[in-house]
Image (cartoon, rainbow, N blue to C red):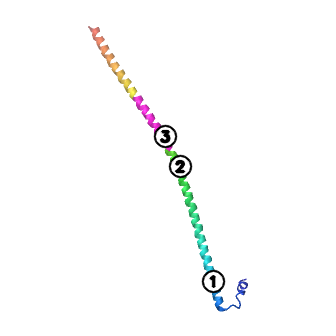
Amino acid sequence: MSWAVEEWKEGLSPRVLQKIHELESQVDKLKKERQQRQFQLESLEAALQKQKQKVENEKNEAATLKRENQSLVELCDSLEKAKQKVSHDLQVKESQVNIQSGQLNSSKKDIERLEQELKR
């Protein structure tokens, strides 16, 4: 079938045939260049999609970490309040122990004094 494609060139001058050959070569070169650029474009589009997906994944991870961080902040606040309550409760108990210790010492002195009085 290539003979039919070449048939239209019959009877043309060598100079015109040379020019046609140059143009066909240029067309082939441009087709190859176009294919290479198309491949580069497709590669760049694939890389862009990959980067977009990576950015989306990073955004999702950042959102997850932000929620986790907020949860930890709330937990820390809750623990700090519990610590303050326990600390306050401990101070109250220590105060009660000191009061009772003082009462015990006072009672011991009273008992000693009463025992001394009984011995007399």
Q: Tell me the amino acid under the disc marked 3.
A: Glu
Q: Which residue in the protein does label 1 denote?
A: 23
The magenta span reads 70-90
Image quadrant occupied by the N terminus? bottom right
Residue 106 vs 27, above or below: the answer is above
Q: Circle 2 is placed at which residue position?
A: 63
Dot 2 crowding, Cα within 10 Å, few <14, some 14–19, many 20+ = few
* Residue 37 % position (x, y): 59, 72
**Residue at image location 63% in from the left, 80% down from the top:** 27
- In terms of sequence position, does the residue under pointer 3 or pointer 1 come before the other? 1
Image height check: is 91 above or below 115? below
Type of amino acid under label 2? Ala
Q: Is residue 6 left or right of residue 78?
A: right
Residue of label 3:
74
Badge 2 marks a residue whose secondary structure is helix
Q: Amino acid at mark 1?
A: Leu
**Pair 3/1: label in front:** 1
The residues bearing labels 1 and 2 have C-alpha atoms spaced at a distance of 58 Å
Q: Nearer the viewer, residue 46 or 117?
A: 46
